Image (cartoon, helix red, strand yellow):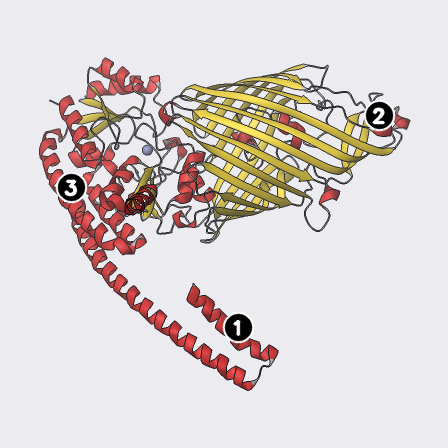
Amino acid sequence: MRTAFAFMVLALLLAAPAQAALRVLACEPEWAALTRELAGELAEVDSATTALQDPHRIEARPSLLAKARRADLLVCTGAELEAGWLPLLQREAGNGRIQPGQPGYFEASAQVPLLERPTQLDRAQGDVHAAGNPHVQLDPRRMATIAAALATRLSQLDPAHAARYAERNTDFQARWQAAITRWEGQGARLKGVPVVVHHRSFSYLADWLGLVVVGDLEPKPGVEPSAAHLAELLGSLHARPARMILRAAYQSAQPSAWLSQKAGIPAVELPYTVGGAPGSDDLFGLFEVTLARLLAAAP
Amino acid sequence: MSTRNTFIVALCALATPALAAPQPQELDAIRAEFEQKFQALQADYEARLKALEGRVQAAETQAGAAQATAQTAAATAEQTAQAAPPPPPPSSAFNPDISLILQGAYNDRAGGERPISGFLPAGAHAHAERGFTLDHTELVMSANIDPYLRGYLNLAFLDDEVEVEEAWFQSLQLGHGLTVKGGRFRSGIGYQNEKHPHAWDFADNNLVYEALFGEGLLQDGVQVRWLAPTELFFELGAEVAKGQFFPGSDAGGDQNGAGSWAAFAHLGGDVGASHSWRTGLSYLKARPREREGWVDDLNDAEALTRFSGDSRTWLADAVWKWAPNGNPRERNLTLAAEYFQRDEDGDLTCIDNSLDGGACLGLTDRYASDQSGWYAQAVYQFMPRWRVGTRYGRLSSGDAELGLNAASLEAADLNPERWSLMTDFSPSEFSRFRLQFNRDEALVGEPDDQVILQYIMSLGPHGAHRF
Ligand SMILES: [Zn+2]
C-alpha cells in the first residue's frame, strides 16, 4: 500500500516537472545562451533562430508565433535587426507581455553604445540600420553590460527569485571578466590585423580585438556580393592587403572562397553566434572557437 | 480573489436594504457581519502588504547588487569601447511608419473583357488592361496608437479615385492569445487573402480568388483571433462584417446587424529545422441582395443579372515551405494550394435586354449553384535574388439551377483553367522585376497566351512579411 502510494507520488512528480518560473524566447542563440547563464533552471529558454539562419531574414513562421504566444520575455537584439519578422510575432501572438515598451521585451542593443551609426538614412546605402550596427554580441565587454541589464530585467519579471538572478549574474560576471582577460592576452597579436568581412557582422569583434576591416564582400549592407564588386575588392586588396576573409556560419561560402583563392589569403568561417561551430555551445565556447580560428589564420 | 468576492457580497448586502427594506434588527445583523468581514479583509490586506514590502526590500538589495555589477561592467566597456553617444530614438518613433508601393506592368494579352466562364463576375477591375499599365500604387501608414492599440491604413491610388484598401485598429494588450481588429481589413480566411498584390508570388491573381472575390475579400467589421497556448500553432478566428463586397452586395450590407460573417481555423508548425507548414479551413457566409453582374446570355448579348439570396463558401488551404537549415537567404521553396466550394441559393433576375437582341425577358426565378475550384503553386528561389514559379488553377462552374432563366442563360458545367509560369529578379528586398507567361482559358473556348512584365518597388521601412 505504502509503496503503491510512493510510486503514485513519484509518477506525479515525473509527469509534472517543476514548473519553470519564466518562459523566455530569445530572438538569437547568443541571447538564449546568456539567459541560460543568468537564469539557469529558473527559466525555460528557447531560441527563435539558429546560428545557421540569417537573423535579418527570418520568416514569421507559425511555430514562432506559437512560441511568442507563450513567452513571458523576449530577449532580442533590436536596432532593427529583426524588423522583417519580430513585429509580426509581437502583434499577432495575442501576448501583451512582449510588446515594445513592456518589461517582457528586452533589447540587447539598447543597453550599449552602438558603432557605425549612419549619418545619412538612404536606401541607396543598402539595408542600413538607423540606430547603428546591431551585431553587438561579439564584443565580450558589451556582453557583460548586457548581462547585467538582463539580470536586472529577470529579477523585475520574477521578483521571487531576484536573489538567485543577482547571485548568478555576479558569478557569471566574475567568470566572464577572467575569460576576457585571458582572451585579450591570447588575441593581443591580432591587433592591427587587416581583414575583409562578408557583412558588417564582425564590427564589434574587430573593435574589441583591434582588427582592421579593410573591405566588405557585400557592396552595400544586406546587398548580395556581386562579381563586379568582388573584382573591384580584389583590385583594392593589391594596394591594401588583408590577412583573412571573415564570414559567419550562416553566410554563403562562395564569395569568400572565390576571393580567398584569387587573393591567396585564408577564408575563415566564424561561428558568429552560439552553435555556429563545434565547441561553441555556450558563450564561452563561442569566444574560444572564434579566437582559435582567428589565431590559426593569422600565424 | 475570494476576499474580493466577500467584499462584493458585503457591498451587495449593504445595498439590498435600500431595495428590500428589511427589518431594523436584520439590518444590524448585516452591519455586524459586514464589520466583521471588513476587519478580516483589512487584516488580510495588511498581512499581504507586509509580505509585499519584504519582497520589495529583497528586490531592492538584489537590484542594487545587479546595478553594482552593471556599473563595473559598463565602466570596463566604456574604458575600452569608443563610447558613442546613446542612439537617439529612430526618426519614425512618433510618426507613423510610411511606405509606398509602386507597381506597374507591361501586358501582352487579348483585348476586351475576359470573364470567367460559368461564374457570376466578382465585379473587380481584373487587370484587363493591355500594353503599359500602372496597376497599383499603394500608400501604407501604420503606428501604435497608444500602448493598447495599433492603427493601419492602406490606400490604393487608381487614376480617378483613391480606394481605402484597409483601415483598421488592432488590440495589442488583450493577452490570453486574443487579438481584436476593427475597421476595414483583408479577411483572415484562406491563405492568400491577407496578402496585398505586391506580396503575391505571381503578377496576377490566381483563378480561385479571382472567381471568389475579384482580388481578395475585404471586410468592414470586427475580427477576433485566438491563438492557443500550445506548442503546435493553432489559431481560431471569427469575423462579422457589413458584407457589401462580393460575394455580398451593397444592398445586402444596407441593414442593421451583419451582412456577412466568416470563421477560420489554422494549424501549423515545423518539421525539423528546414520545413514549416500551415493548413487552414475557412467558412464565409454572405447574404447578397440585388447583387448585379454582367454575363453573356444564350444570344451572346450582354445581360445584367440581379441576385438575392445566400452565399456560402468553404475554403481549405495548405502551405509548405522549405529552406536549407531554415535559412531562406540562398535557396527556398514554397508550395501552396487552396480549394473552395461555394453554393449560392436565391432568386436571379435577368434584366430584359430583348430590344438589344438579348435573350432575357426580365424574369425572376430560383437560382442555385454549387461551384468549386482549386489552384496550386510552387515558387523556388534557386539562388539569391532569383526565383522561378509555376501555378495552375482550375474551376468547376457546376450545373446551375436556373428555373425560367434557363431559357436565356447558359447552365452548362464549364471548367475554366489557367497555367502560369514566372521568374522574378529582386535586386534587393525592396525591389522586384517579374516576367510571367499565362496560358489563360478562363474564358472557355477562347484561350489566350499572355505575357506580363511587372515591377514592384517598395519605398520606406522594412515591411514585416506574413508567412
Ligand atoms: Zn546586419
Residue under mark 2: which chain is it in?
Answer: B
Ligand 1, what quadrant?
Answer: top left
Residue type beneath disc 2? Ala
Q: What is the crowding at mark 1: few (fewer than 14 residues within 10 Å), some, or many (at least 20)?
A: few
State which chain disc 1 sits on.
B
> Which quadrant of the figure has residue B79?
top left
Q: Amino acid at mark 1?
A: Cys
Chain letter belonging to callout 3: A
Mark identifier at residue A21? none
Q: Is residue A189 above or below residue A8?
A: above
- Residue B318 drawn at (x, y percent): 53, 28
User: Residue B403, how many percent across, how many down?
Assistant: 84, 29
- The circle on residue B406 is 2
In the image, are marks 2 and 1 on the same chain? yes
Residue A10, image quadrant: top left
Does residue A106 sit above or below B65 in this rendering?
above
Residue located beneath label 1 in the image: B12
Q: Return the residue at label 3.
A: A176
Using the rendered view, name the quadrant where residue B242 is placed.
Answer: top right
The vertical placement of B283 against A219, above or below, is below
Give the structural element (helix, strand or loop) at label 1.
helix
Same-chain check, marks 3 and 1:
no
Left or right side of A134 for A57: right
Give the residue at the far bottom of this rendering. Answer: B24
Marks 2, 3: nearer the viewer = 2
Q: Secondary structure at mark 3?
A: helix
Does the residue tagged 1 have its C-beta within 8 Å of any atom of ligand 1?
no
